[in-house]
Amino acid sequence: MPPASPQTGDTAPQLHLPTVDGQSCDLAALRGHHVLVSFLRHAG
């Protein structure tokens, strides 16, 4: 059985992602702020 989908108000999972300028961002460091995560497909 697949895991349940996240619901509004659920805590986001831990994410450590690269930014568009090559830096990295840890989602936990942004706790308490509104965050929009956009996943872009890299052509190549």
Image (cartoon, rainbow, N blue to C red):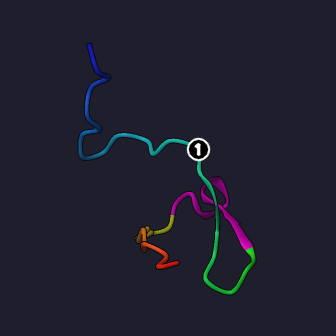
Left or right of 27 on screen, residue 8: left
Q: Residue furthest right?
A: 23
Looking at the image, residue 1 sits to the left or right of residue 18; the answer is: left
What residue is drawn where x is 47% and y is 79%?
43
Q: Is residue 30 magenta?
A: yes
Q: Is residue 1 above or below residue 17?
A: above
Residue interval drawn in magenta: 24-32
In this picture, is 24 found above or below 6? below
Amino acid residing under circle 1: Gln
Which one is nearer the viewer's eye here, 42 or 35?
42
The residue that appears at 43% across and 41% down in the rendered structure is 11
Assign a secondary structure to mark 1: loop
Residue at the limit of the structure toward the front, as seen here: 44
Q: Which residue is situated farthest in the top direction here?
A: 1
Q: Position of residue 42 (x, y in %)?
A: 49, 76
Which residue bears the numbered disc 1? Answer: 14
Q: Quadrant of the N terminus?
A: top left
Magenta-span inclusion, residue 6: no
Residue beneath the point at 29% across and 38% down: 6
- Residue 5 quadrant: top left
Labels in figure, total: 1
Mark 1 crowd level (few <14, some 14–19, many ≥20, 10 Å Cα): few
Q: Is residue 4 above or below residue 12?
A: above
Task: State the image quarter where residue 24 is shown.
Answer: bottom right
Image position, residue 29 (x, y; %): 67, 60
The one nearer the camera, 36 or 22, is 22
Q: Quadrant of residue 4?
A: top left
